[in-house]
Amino acid sequence: MSAPRPKFAPSATAVEPADDETDGRRRRSQDSRARIVAAMLELVHAGDVSPGAEQVAARAGVGLRTVFRHFSDMDSLYSEMSRVIEAEVRSVIDAPFAAEGWRERLVELVHRRAAVFEKIAPFKRASDIHRHQSRFLQAGHERLVMLSREILKRELPTEAARDQITFETLDLLLSFEAWSRLRRDQDLTPRRARDVLEQAVRKIIG
């Protein structure tokens, strides 16, 4: 965050118009950037996993040069998208659990991740397509995997967390990849996919 702007005495009238003009340009620039990011998110949410700069500019109602003025390449635009999505996911995943016992907390975790994965699915698929060429998307993917594993390990009792087969199986079942397979390749409804994962987790934890 930048330092607060100094306040000048009223007599410094010659400076005020320049300040107003600068503030106006800054606000317009911030507005354009926000519109570009929103346009990107809207296009991806609509199912376009690889929108081009021209599409983003048209959706945002700005010129193509404005897009590249704010984002020197599409990778930096994807990094902004990744940041927004990661913040949304973290706000849901980090919420305190309502269930008491660890088994019921794991079932609650299934429900939570089902809701989160369904919400971010278009963005995650777009991210997965492009992350081989984007260090921002790759880093975001690695953080999501690490965070998911940490939460699972935290909720499991020590003995279960140290059982590699149990831990890795649960980690797989609670992954976005498992959710995507059930939803897309097996064509299950969100409710049915969630039920499948819940029953699988219950069988493993007993």
Image (spheres, helix red, strand yellow):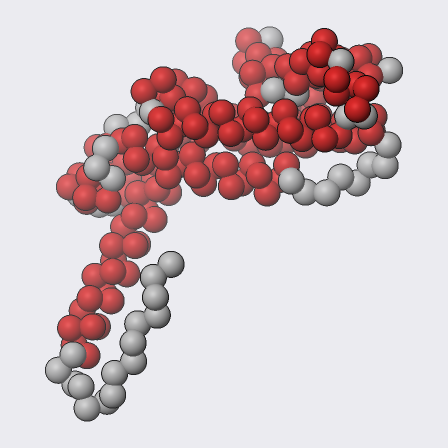
Q: Say which residue appears at 63% left-offset and 24% top-offset.
A: 149
Nearest to the observer: residue 170 or residue 25 = 170
Q: Say which residue appears at 27% left-offset and 50% top-offset.
A: 32
Quadrant (top left, top right, bottom left, bottom right) of the N terminus: bottom left
Evaluate whether residue 163 shows in this view.
yes
The quadrant where residue 7 appears: bottom left
Q: Say which residue appears at 30% left-offset and 30% top-offset.
A: 75
Q: Say which residue appears at 36% left-offset and 35% top-offset.
A: 79
Query: Is 97 placed above or below 172 here?
Result: below
Relative image position of residue 178 (x, y in whole percent): 60, 15
Relative image position of residue 51 (x, y in whole percent): 30, 27
The quadrant where residue 151 appears: top right
Query: Is 93 on the left or on the right of 130, as rendered?
Result: right
Query: Is 24 on the left or on the right of 123, as rendered?
Result: left
Quadrant (top left, top right, bottom left, bottom right) of the C terminus: top right
Q: Residue furthest left?
A: 14
Q: Residue furthest bottom?
A: 11
